Amino acid sequence: MNHPKPAVYKPDAFKSAPKSKFALTPARLMLFALVLLGLQFAAASSPAPAPAQTASAPDQTPAPQAAPQSPASPSSLAFDRYHTPAELNAALLDMARANPAFARTHSLAKSSGGRELILLEIGPETAKTAIPANPALPSNPASPATPSQPSKTFPAVFIAADMEGTVPISGEAALYLARLIIAAPALRADRTWYILPCGNPDAASLFFAKPLRLDPRNARPHNDDMDDQIDEDGPEDLNGDGLITQMRVKDPEGEWMSVPGQPRLLKRADWSKGEKGVYKLYSEGIDNDGDGKYNEDGPGGTNVGTNFPHLFKFFAPDSGAWPGSEAESFALFKFFDAHREIGLTFVFGESNFCLNPPRGGRRSESDLSQIKIPERIASAFGADPARTYTMAEIMEMVKPMAPPGMEITESMIAGFLGLGAVVNPLDDDLKFYKELSEKFKEFLKTNKLDAKRLDPPPDKDGSFELWSYYQLGLPSFALDFWTLPEVKEEKKAEALTADQLEKMTKDEFLALGEEKIDAFLKAAGAPAQFKAKQVIDMVKAGQLDPKKMADMMKQMPKPPSEEGIDPKDKALLAFSDKELAGKGFVDWKPFKHPTLGEVEIGGAVPYADNTPPPAMIEPLLKGQVPWVFEVAKKMARVRIASAEIKPVGTGVYEIKVRIENTGALPYPTAMARRNERILPVIVTLEGPGIKIVDGKKRTLIPAIQGLATQTATWIVQSDKPVKIEVKAETQTAWRDTRVIELGGVK
Ligand SMILES: [Ca+2]
Ligand SMILES: [Ca+2]
Ligand SMILES: [Ca+2]
Ligand SMILES: [Ca+2]
């Protein structure tokens, strides 16, 4: 018999690699393979933790449902208005009560304002972990998750909504999603759903409070301005219209000016264009503590939505004392820690990873000119661990080691050497983000919805979605549901410059026609009464010629410019006028302010720019929420595609098992391989009396790309006929079992 081969794990990438002209030794090649695949050298010697639970039966078949019953959905649940955080909770409790066979709730935490964070769990393994409801309890009948709860064998999807508490439609979307899942047994047959419709209930409750104000902070008292008092200066509804808007005050030092022709809008004056600021802007209120600032320290608190560890902002006014300083966010740390089966997350809120992948281009703080190569890697690179190298030098060292066709990038090397913090999405992950983004656009088109978002807000530092991707290593998708429709720019007539005009003959000028001349006059800032008709007459009469006009034009002050207006302001006004009967904007009206004197109060109505009128809720959700199911279908799903047995000697067999990922998403993400948060695929062989001659009883496959296959091979010896159970187990991508039979010595 041959001497056992050194390795059993054979990544596809190397199977067909021809003998390299760089004379790679197999060991060197393997080492490189391990390097690139992110399998740390330590992993080979240190045992990986056991998978969550071993199942005796193949798990590919969905668990049978309890007697199919028509799923109850609370009749009161209509998406024709926005629901308070308390109503959202009540709806979840109703859903759980009505469907005990597959649904339950968890009370995750209580906010500083005393509001409960209720999470709805739906799934085939939910009932067996459920704690019977106690009818005597008025609120949540289910107890919080306990550490003694058995872990689940199916993967889970987690949906966190309204983490910033400022996007009412996101909570509705979560509820809508829950209703769809309850109504469709197929959606909940082989995975668990965790749905948190309101991650920041204190802030979310402000949408239902008077006066109306938008603030992402929870109710925990916090000294925002670091003076000697806490929460001493919040806003006041001075004009009594039930809204907190803005105050503008004429001030020589003001930076703001009205937009010419659009007196309701303000823009920052551009000094370089000769514009002069007229107003100072404040939020509506008085200076309660007399420190000269207005509303600098309102009630609360911390924005739960940015209280997560990745790129957490220390000392920002609303980010909290440390990541997880709030009960709301810390409860999620605990929940994710206890539920390692979560394999996909969605965040319903303001940003949208379905259209735009997580933001890249952040600068990582690592010095690429002085890189030390760790000793354990240095020998593989043929490098000296005692000295420093530049990135360029390392690239030169590494390039010849790469198998043909494999491109080595600096970021791969930086990633492997662990240089700096990871602040940008990894290239391999951007592939699926981009692909899904294209699919999402098609999906929206099919549903007759616009993929165009008005200046989509980028992901925020310290957000749940970044934590979930960068630190938990999960495919993480943020999804918003609405932005103001963009105002279509009217096609501007070609602007005629003074220089062009100067060169024109009289006839050429007249040939422009009345319409074009009017547009030109307007663009040139001519007085309103100065119309094309007069100009044409004057030119015809010889009183005016193009040269004279060009001279006049050059001496005229620059026309007021619309440049510098926030397109969102413009969109809000247009939407307010057209769809909200003007209710989205308060016209500026004079007000006598106790300390500022004559001011004007007005501006955008809180939430008008991110919260569509109730009649739009259901159509928007209907067309977008089901996208979650499309992505969930693409979750990595590991199965045993084939198991071949080949006799290679007396009672000796080669067993070759092909492990397939039938999902389009990789298992795990490149980020998870980098941060080692998700276990590799663990393939085991189990059979009475068998001897594994070559290969390991537990074979680790670090990653399987979407729709790809990996092969594991063993040489096994057995004198007797025997049944061998082959298992492929994962943390978040299902598991599979297959029984094979060896014939024994014949
Ligand atoms: Ca203060
Ligand atoms: Ca405060
Ligand atoms: Ca007001
Ligand atoms: Ca103040």
Image: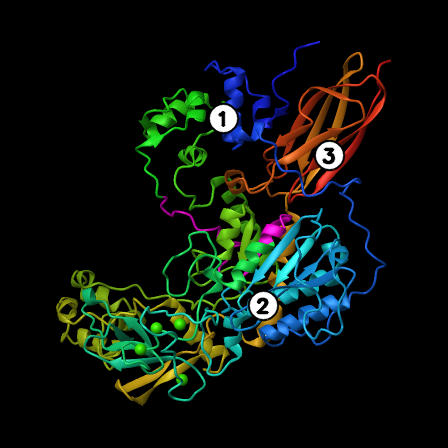
Q: Residue at x 49, y 47 (%)?
A: 470
Gap in angstroms between the C-alphas marked 2 and 3: 40 Å
Gap in angstroms between the C-alphas marked 2 and 1: 47 Å
Label 3 belongs to which residue? 727
The majority secondary structure of the magenta stretch comes to loop
Disc 3 crowd rating (10 Å Cα; few below 14, some 14-19, many 20+) is many
Report the span colored magenta.
336-364
Residue type pointed to by label 3: Lys
Residue type pointed to by label 1: Gly
Mark sitting earlier along the chain (2/1): 2
Q: SS of the residue at dot 1?
A: loop
Residue type pointed to by label 2: Gly
Residue in front for this viewpoint, 58 or 587: 58
Label 1 belongs to which residue? 405
431 horizontally vs 190: left or right: left
Place of residue 305 in the rendered image (x, y in percent of width and height, measured from the top left): 48, 62
Q: Nearer the viewer, mark 2 or mark 3?
A: 3
Q: Nearer the viewer, mark 3 or mark 1?
A: 3
Mark sitting earlier along the chain (3/1): 1
Based on the displayed image, in which of its 4 quarters is residue 669 positioned?
top right
Gap in angstroms between the C-alphas marked 3 and 1: 33 Å
Q: Residue at x 68, y 10 (%)?
A: 2
Disc 1 crowd rating (10 Å Cα; few below 14, some 14-19, many 20+) is few
The answer to whether residue 514 shows anywhere in this view is no
Q: SS of the residue at dot 3?
A: strand
Disc 2 C-beta below 8 A from ligand 2: no
Disc 3 C-beta below 8 A from ligand 2: no
380 horizontally vs 517: left or right: right
Please tell me whether residue 530 belongs to the stretch shown in magenta.
no
Q: SS of the residue at dot 2?
A: helix
- Label of residue 171 in the image: 2
Place of residue 730 in the rendered image (x, y in percent of width and height, measured from the top left): 66, 40
